[in-house]
Image (cartoon, rainbow, N blue to C red):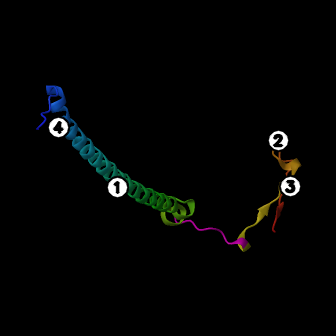
Amino acid sequence: MVRQYRGSMMARMAAPFLGVLVFMGIFGMVWLRSEIVSTEYAIGELELRMEEALKEKQQLEAMLSSAMSIREVGQRGLGLNFPDRQKVFYVLREDDALGQTASLKNWKAGRIAER
């Protein structure tokens, strides 16, 4: 004796529908995983490019600071040189010769001391 299935129409359609739904879910998870991996690779590449740009920025700032240093500008642009230590002399300051009066009564000539 052969027994026939007497389920409702909804029960007959539920099995293929659930099969398609499971297949789409698995496909969706695989697709989502591949998108996440490709996004991680893109982020890593952008981080490398950012590090290279920061290194280049630091090199350019160093070049700019060395080019714009006072010594470089003075020597190249103005023709200035740093003085020799043996040729430098110092002037001593005295309190009574500050120039607070307009007369030259208390002025003392020759108050230059060499060190």
Residue receiving disc 4: 16
Is 82 in the magenta?
A: yes
Spatial CA span between label 4 and label 2: 109 Å
Is the N terminus in the top left, top right, bottom left or bottom right quadrant? top left
State the separation of the CA atoms marked 4 and 1: 38 Å
Q: Amino acid at mark 4?
A: Pro
Q: Place residue 113 in its image quadrant.
A: bottom right
How far is the residue under mark 3 from the one under mark 1? 81 Å
The magenta span reads 79-85
Nearer the N terminus, badge 2 or badge 3? 2
Measured Cα–Cα span from mark 2 to mark 3: 14 Å
**C-alpha distance separating marks 2 and 1:** 76 Å
Nearer the observer: mark 3 or 4; the answer is 4
2 vs 3, front mark? 2
Residue occupied by mark 2: 100
Earlier sequence position, callout 3 versus callout 1: 1
Q: Secondary structure at mark 1?
A: helix
89 to the left or right of 56: right
Helix, strand, or loop for circle 2?
Answer: loop
Judging depth in this view, the residue of 5 and 115 nearest the camera is 5
Point out which mark residue 76 bears. Answer: none
Q: Which disc, if any, is residue 41?
A: 1
